[in-house]
Image (cartoon, rainbow, N blue to C red):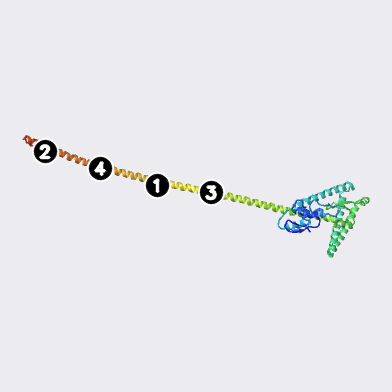
Amino acid sequence: MPAYFNPQGSIRKAPHSPSRDSTRQRVKFSDDRVCKSHLLNCCPHDILSGTRMDLGECLKVHDLALRADYEIASKQQDFFFELDAMDHLQSFISDCDKRTNIAKKRLADTQEEISAEVAAKAETVHELNEEIGKLLAKAEQLGADGNVEESQKIMDEVERTRIAKREAEEIYRSSMPASSFQQQKLRVCEVCSAYLGLHDNDRRLADHFGGKLHLGFIEIRDKLDELKKIVAGKQEKRNQDRLKRREEREREERDKLKKRSRSRERRRHRSSSKDRKGKTRSRSRDKHHHHRSRSGSRSRSRSHHRSRDRSRDQSSKSKSSRDKEGTSRDRDRSKERRHKKRSHETSNGKSEEQSPEEVEAGEI
């Protein structure tokens, strides 16, 4: 028997049909050609198969093996196929509701028009008929499942509903002419768009409400409501996750901006500190230079004063020495003149007496 690899990597045995073998080899459950409603076990083509509203074969691939592969893979990953299945069922139910509205309009055009009061009484009879049919179908199902006690309770409720139906029919009959009451009044089933008669017996009502067509539509509608809730919940979760991721990104951006701002502030602070230190050092250098300049000036001033004092001292010393030298020279010259005079007088043989004032002046 041939085999194929499913998306999980395990080997499955394929059925004997060669067309199915080739299909499985070509597609995986995630392929667009695969019916997502079939994977979720809610395709109308499967549910309504064999009824008078059989839709025939689905245009997309149906394969129980692919469904099994999807059920295994969906436990580890969310493929969100519910959205595709919801759109499919919603489109089908929308078409069914359109058919129901068309059938109601056709009945309104063909049946005798009645007043609103009489129509309400007829509606009550129809509702009781539906209730009886649903209860009978449920009781039969419980009996088939072996739950006899519950089935008997349902049948007791059916009897009470039958009594209420007979009373409603009497009220409806009294409000209608005899000729009109005998006419078969039809109603369109809101679930499956089938026609229901006002005077249908219990057996026909049970066959309708317990039949595969009506129950199939109930299953489809229930599944659609379930899918809507699932999709809404997943979309809400995705939106929350998206919002959470966006908030995390915004928080990261804010943190980055804060870090950049703090970094700029630190750089600015370091720069201002360097400037302050530079200014302080400059002031210190200026003060030191000024102090040194003043000290140098003072030193130079003191040196200048000392040099001036030395110069003065030296000049005074030089002057005194010059004065002394001049005085000594004058004395020498005076002595020399006296000596010459005496020598001249001696040589001439003359001697003159000098007064003391002259002698003193000559000495000077």
Q: From the image, which quarter does the C terminus lie in? A: top left
Distance in Å between CA atoms under marks 1 and 3: 33 Å
Element under disc 3: helix
Q: Residue 74: which quarter of the image? A: bottom right
- In this picture, residue 236 sits left or right of residue 186: left
Farthest residue toward the front? 1
Give the class, few, some or many, for how many residues have Cα within 10 Å of label 3's Cα (few <14, many ≥20): few
Query: Badge 4, how many Cα within 10 Å: few under 14, some, many 20+?
Result: some
Q: CA distance from mark 2 to mark 3?
A: 105 Å
Residue 192: mark: none
**Separation of residues labelled 3 and 4 (CA atoms):** 70 Å
Asked if labels 2 and 4 touch by Cβ distance under 8 angstroms, the answer is: no
The residue that disc 2 covers is 339
Q: Which residue is mark 1?
A: 288
Which residue matches tag 3?
265
Residue ID at (44%, 47%): 281
Q: CA distance from mark 4 to mark 2?
A: 36 Å
Amino acid bearing label 3 = Glu
**Amino acid identity at mark 2:** His
Q: Type of residue at label 1?
A: His
Point out the tag, 2 or 3, that comes first from the N-terminus: 3
Please provide percent x and percent y for residue 301.
Answer: 33, 43
Q: Residues within 10 Å of mark 2 (few under 14, many from 20)?
A: few
Instruction: Compute the Cα span from label 1 to label 4.
Output: 37 Å
Going 49% across and 47% down the picture, which residue do you hit?
272
Q: Please, what is the three-letter code of the amino acid marked with disc 4?
A: Gln
The first of marks 3 and 4 along the sequence is 3
